[in-house]
Image (cartoon, rainbow, N blue to C red):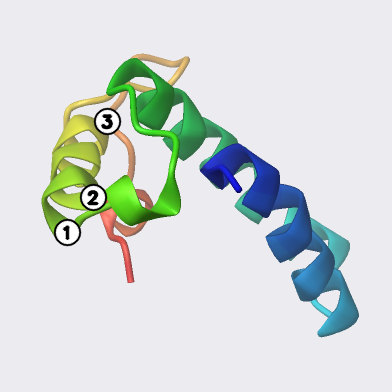
């Protein structure tokens, strides 16, 4: 099963847990962005997702600009 296949399962899990629609929408947006990064890095399987890959993604976020041309807030760039 690919990472892309797992995302709807995770989002459904959030819904079952009773998370707000806004939380789920935010998670979906963030995960879609992560999936784009992983696709560019040719990472499709969960087993390929390492701490180094996540650190690279976090660094990518740190230098990304919003539509307004400002940097993302620090909270956006942190992966828990």
Mark 3 lies on a secondary structure that is: loop
Mark 3 or mark 1, which has the lower sequence index? 1
Q: Residue at x 17, y 59 (%)?
A: 51
Give the residue at x 47% y 15%: 67
Write down the residue under mark 3.
71
The residue at which mark 1 appears reads as: 51
Front in this rendered view, residue 34 or 26: 34
Q: Position of residue 66 (x, y in %)?
A: 41, 23
Secondary structure of the residue carrying numbered label 2: helix
Q: Quadrant of the C terminus?
A: bottom left
> Dot 1: within a 10 Å radius of its alpha carbon, few (fewer than 14), some, or many (20 or more) residues?
few
- On screen, residue 8 versus residue 4, left or right, reads right
From the image, tell me which residue sits under label 2.
54
For residue 9, above or below residue 62: below
Cα distance between the residues tagged 3 and 2: 19 Å
**Few, some or many residues within 10 Å of mark 2 (<14, 14–19, 20+):** some
Q: Are marks 3 and 2 in contact (CB under 8 Å)?
A: no
Q: Nearer the viewer, mark 3 or mark 1?
A: 1
Residue in view at x 34 percent, y 17 percent: 40
Residue 47's quadrant in the figure? Answer: bottom left
Q: Nearer the viewer, mark 3 or mark 2?
A: 2
In the rendered view, does 42 fall on the left or right side of 17?
left
Distance, label 3 to label 1, CA atoms, is 23 Å
**In the figure, is residue 33 to the left or right of 61?**
right
Q: Position of residue 4 (x, y in %)?
A: 61, 39
Q: Residue at x 21, y 55 (%)?
A: 50
- 46 versus 31 height, above or below: below
Position above or below: 45 against 19: above
Query: Would you say the residues marked 2 and 1 are in contact, meaning their CB atoms lie under 8 Å apart?
Result: yes
Q: Earlier in the sequence, mark 3 or mark 2?
A: 2
* Image marks 3 and 1: residues in contact by CB distance under 8 Å: no
Q: Position of residue 56 (x, y in %)?
A: 14, 39
């Amino acid at each position: 099963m690919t990472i892309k296949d797992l995302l709807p399962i995770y989002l459904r899990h959030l819904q079952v847990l009773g998370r707000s629609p806004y939380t789920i929408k935010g998670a979906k947006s963030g995960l879609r962005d992560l999936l784009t990064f992983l696709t560019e890095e040719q990472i499709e399987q969960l087993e390929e997702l390492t701490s180094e890959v996540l650190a690279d993604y976090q660094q990518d976020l740190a230098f990304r600009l919003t539509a307004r041309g400002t940097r993302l807030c620090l909270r956006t760039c942190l992966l828990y």
